[in-house]
Amino acid sequence: MSENNLFAQELELQAKNLSLQAKKLQAMADALKINDCVETNQANTILVQAVEEKVKRKLNKSEGFSLGVLANKLRGTDQAIIGAALIQMVNNGEAKAITTTPKRGASVTKYYLNK
């Protein structure tokens, strides 16, 4: 009977050890997820800054472009990233956005580089 009791206690200790290892692995996985999110945000910021330079070059040569026209001129670049770059430029005072509403059709927002 004592051998069975010792065996049961040993199994309980192993189970507790496995539980602690599982908690440790879960904490490590959570830390990796947080780190991955931070790295993704940093990568997006760098990407928006790079696109911002391209947008500045295009706007510098023009009287103004809408988001759709800029997306067409900068093919291969995601339109959402171009939009984020434009918003950041407007917020920083590097560009201005002017919205015109015609009698017919949808409103159009054109972006101009502040000189």
Image (cartoon, grey):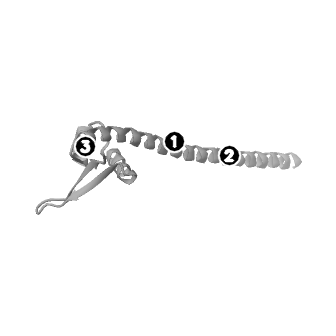
Count neighbours of disc 3 (C-alpha within 10 A) and say few if under 14, some if 14 to 19, many if 20 or more.
Answer: many
Residue at 48% across / 45% down in the picture?
41
Type of amino acid at the residue the image marks with label 1:
Glu
Type of amino acid at the residue the image marks with label 2:
Lys
Task: Name above or below for residue 2 compared with residue 51.
Answer: below
The residue at the far left in this view is: 104
Q: Is residue 89 left or right of residue 27?
A: left
Residue at 82% across / 49% down in the picture?
9
- The numbered mark at residue 24 is 2
Which picture quadrant has residue 75? top left
Q: Whole-Å distance between the Cαs marked 1 and 3?
A: 28 Å
Q: Nearer the viewer, mark 1 or mark 2?
A: 1
Type of amino acid at the residue the image marks with label 3:
Leu
Labelled pair 1, 2 in contact (Cβ < 8 Å): no
Q: Earlier in the sequence, mark 1 or mark 3?
A: 1
Residue holding disc 1: 39
Q: Earlier in the sequence, mark 2 or mark 3?
A: 2
Q: Nearer the viewer, mark 2 or mark 3?
A: 3
Q: Position of residue 17 (x, y in %)?
A: 74, 45
Which picture quadrant has residue 3? top right
Residue holding disc 3: 70
Q: Is residue 114 left or right of residue 107?
A: right
Count neighbours of disc 1 (C-alpha within 10 A) and say few if under 14, some if 14 to 19, many if 20 or more.
Answer: few
Labelled pair 1, 3 in contact (Cβ < 8 Å): no
Q: Nearer the viewer, mark 1 or mark 3?
A: 3
Under tag 2, what secondary structure? helix
The residue at the far bottom in this view is: 103
Q: Whole-Å distance between the Cαs marked 2 and 3?
A: 49 Å
Under tag 1, what secondary structure? helix
Residue at 37% across / 52% down in the picture?
93
Q: Whole-Å distance between the Cαs marked 1 and 2?
A: 23 Å
